[in-house]
Image: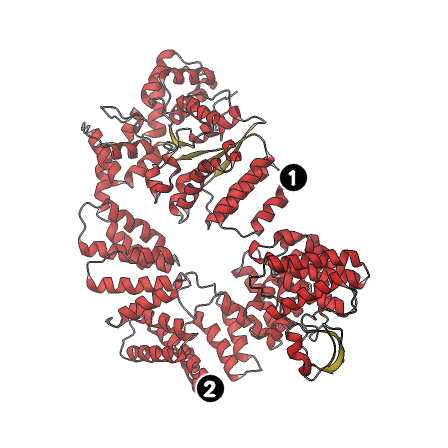
Amino acid sequence: MKKLIKYTILPQDLYVDREADRQLKRIVNEMQRPGYVLVARQMGKTNLLFNAKRNLETTDVRFVYIDMSNMFNSQLDCYRNIIDLIVESQFEGSITVDTQIIKIRKLSSPPHIEYTKCLRFLLKEFSGKLVLVLDEIDALKSVSYSDHVFAQIRSNYFARVNYPEFERLTYLLSGVIEPIDLIKDKNKSPFNIGEKIYLDDFTLSEHEEFVRKSMLDINHEISLFIFEQTGGNPRLTFDILSELEDKIIEGQNIFIEDVEKVIKKKYLTNFDVAPVDHIRELVQDNKMARKAVRKLQSGINNISDEEWKKLYLFGIVGAKKTSKVIIKNRIISDSLTLEWINSVDNLIGDLFAEGYGSFSNKRFEDAIEIFTRYLSETDIISNSNKDIANFTIGRSYYNLGKFELASEKFKEPFSTKPLDKEARMFQGLAMMASGQSSIGAEIIETELKTAHPGYTHNLAKINLAYFYSDVDSIKTERIVDSLLKDLSSEIDDGENGIDYFLTASRYLKAATLVEKDEINGALELILLAMNSSAVEYMPEILRYKTELDGDSSGDDILRAKNLIIDNSLNFESSGQKYLGFNEFILLNILYTLHKLRLYDDRDELVSYAVEKLYTGRSEWEILAIVGKVVKKKHDLALYTKYVIDKKIITVNSEHIGIIRVLLMNSDDKVFNYLDYFNTFVSLISSDVSIFVASDIKIMGIGNGYEYQESNFLRLISNVEIFEKCIGYVPLDKIHETFLVYYWKAYGLYAINLEKEAKLAANRCISIIEEYRDLAISLITKEGLESVRRQMYQIIGKTINSKPVLQGKKIQRNTVVKVEYINGDIKLVKFKKIEKDYRNGQCKILEINK
């Protein structure tokens, strides 16, 4: 039976301990510093880590393996992934642990604080040692938050002073990149306090041990020859022996000639087998490595420390730098010949043309990769070519929608003045697109003062006009008029985007005329925009035309719907062009179809969106998010009611978001508020983790209606459910939970549970007093003071009164029955006692209808 098969993780009976295993064991036993396994690929790094887990893990020492190459968008997501893996592997099925982690996350603390709190809690739940193995950490080089992660690792060791539980936590990090290349801020590096673990090739004795474990019938001469060829490289040794094993199983006798044939066929013919293929690819893409290999192959030994580190991490030289550096085995040496190095260098000269061709053909990822290589690999570059390469990389990032990377690239100095000015304008455009609108607009305005007409100039102007369209219609109109004047003298060459700029300018100009109630003029411009528009901009133009001319027939909006479906339009991927078809435009068209009661056409477009535009969203969910574009509160309430009542899917927690929208934007006059409020309470009851701070306001409004309808028992039941949710309220909103106890006090008092009512009233007062200086969004200061007095009255004496009526506005001429602090009761119009009521001098007992 074959023993040397392709294992993902090498079994124990084949594993050979090396010095790195012993070093790693010591680090885990001491728990005093992070270990960092620094090694080339294909050297057994992952096997080293899993073997440590296999041999060192006990009931008192737990290992958790985390693959950091699974990239996350944010520091918070990265931390939460680590915590989730700890919980899933060590605390699976623990409701206590799951609940507490959810509670900590609901506090919305900064990412590093949340991570620390979760780690402390988990360490307290487990009395042993915890070893976090972070593999492939070199992947963090490409994310903006990498330094924060490394700073957090370092912080966990220093936090032992305040939190002794961190004495039982240590990290093992693993990667194929030097720490100096991984950390942007060296002061945050955990490697300053860590210990490097170099994973070297087998020694001769370790090689012989592996041959024995493989149980192959080969003589010592052949074993020694294999070692001479591989230099003890574990991957090469395993694969060569595996090939020989096949021959032995077939009944062949093995000679040195057979080993030579295996090596030549497997590694030195097509050069497409690991680790040779990977090493050649790394050398091909790295100028320093090629230069160092050239020196070694030419017998020159003046290899710098930096070059040696690079060659070690590429798997070309050994882990210890000696006075004479050599390529560590014959197979790798024969795959990196001088002839091959020269052929790679000759290819570099063609990279510029190849990169520009990729950009012209809209292969932007390729353009970035090729020009980046061109800049790093070419010995002598003219300033002009350097500028073009950097500018094209920036444009490629911009076209891909990677605006932050584009902005960084455009910040670089350009020696050519015209290109420098274009770079500054694109920097401003990229900043506007990445959320730094004001700064970006300021840069663009400065550069436009001296810019010449052209594509970049036009793009900058139209973006600037859109930026001001929401805040300054006069300035928007001035910019658009200037752009339309510029465009009138430009010749359309098919590549300068004149049609787009004309379309967008006319659309924006129409919007400024609407601001001045010049609807006819606006419609004329929209018709002109339609004449110059490409198909991808037509849906929004037709929707806007429907809005302006009040087309109740829906002809234009139906045309917009058909254009989307017939042309299989996708969302504008880079987000760089206004009017380009996007989610906001889709939702507006869907809502317009809904308002015009064109339900079949609306549903047809929803079906298209499910199939072509969204992944994993149902038709009901798309209908739900349409509410994001409904502007009027009353319309939003009616629309969300319609969506909920469709009941396309079974009522469950997925409904909670849309029901929140409904309850926050409606009142009992639109429909029976309590029907939907009770559904909301039922959802919260089934899963308290979905509770958010804004739900306190909904609870206040809903319980106000329950009180008005004398549904006291249901009110108390609701409050008890919301009490369970208080642990999920962020700390900065905890003071608003006074409202929970306010209603609890009144509900209990209404059913004559006076003792319990007093306890609730006391809790309400204590929250108000404790957070007196914090702003509360639910109620005015005067109203809060009135609440406090009402609670004191429940505590102090029996009263026959009703609480402040939430969600109900009292008209000035409404007749009300009020009780003053001194006990006087009056029946008067509200306007007569409004001032006293606002100042807390009286409370309303009844409202005459």
Q: Which residue is mark 2?
A: 517
Left/right placement of residue 119 relative to residue 141 reads right
Q: Residue at x 50, y 20 (%)?
A: 13
Q: Which percent across, then down, holds residue 436?
A: 38, 62
- State whether residue 780 appears in this view: no
Q: Is residue 762 above or below residue 323?
A: below
Question: Residue at coordinates 57% horizontally, 27% vertically from top-left?
Answer: 60
- Could you classify mark 1 by the number of other residues whose Cα lies within 10 Å: few (under 14), some (14-19), or many (20 or more)? few
Q: Position of residue 157 (x, y in %)?
A: 45, 35
Specify few, some or many for label 2: CA neighbours under 10 Å numbering under 14, 14-19, or 20 or more.
few
Alpha-carbon distance for marks 1 and 2?
Answer: 63 Å
Q: Nearer the viewer, residue 627 or 472?
A: 472
Residue 535, x across and y down, in percent: 44, 71
Return the mark for residue 93. Answer: 1
Q: In percent of the image, x 56 and y 36: which residue is there?
A: 123
The C terminus - image quarter: bottom right
**What amino acid is at disc 2?**
Asp
Q: Secondary structure at mark 2?
A: loop
The kind of residue tagged 1 is Gly
Between 752 and 687, the residue placed more toward the observer is: 752
Q: Dot 1 lies on which element?
A: loop
Q: Does residue 606 appear in this view?
A: yes
Residue 48 x, y percent position in the rendering: 45, 27
